Amino acid sequence: MQRIADLTREYEIPARLLELEITESMLMADPERSRAELLDLKNAGFSLSIDDFGSGYSSPTT
């Protein structure tokens, strides 16, 4: 969270202009910490998206 906040300040990018995609598997690795981090990101103004759709099942295109 802190690194993202630092970068948005450094480059003067409003948090509301960014959408962060978080994978479901990352959230489940440490649910309590993830909950706190997601709340911090939301309160800082970031949009959040959770995605693991098709994880491990995609096939390469030819």
Image (cartoon, rainbow, N blue to C red):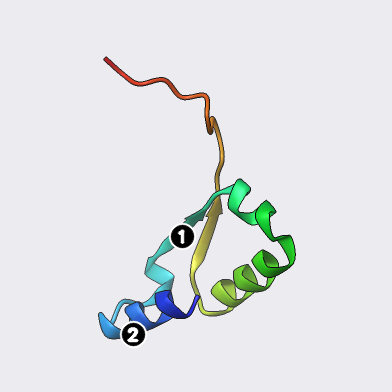
Rendered residue at 53%/60% (across/down): 48
Farthest residue, direction front:
29
Name the residue beneath numbered marker 2.
9
Rendered residue at 33%/85% (across/down): 9
The answer to which quarter of the image holds residue 40 is: bottom right
Q: Amino acid at mark 1?
A: Leu
- Does 1 appear above or below 58? below
Q: Secondary structure at mark 1?
A: strand
The answer to which quarter of the image holds residue 27 is: bottom right
- Does 11 appear above or below 55? below
Count of numbered badges drawn on the protein: 2
| Residue nearest the observer in this picture, 47 or 34 | 34
Q: Amino acid at mark 2?
A: Arg
Q: What percent of the width, then of the height, locates residue 3?
A: 41, 77
Q: What percent of the width, then of the height, locates residue 30?
A: 69, 60
Q: Which mark is residue 58?
A: none
Name the residue beneath numbered marker 1.
20
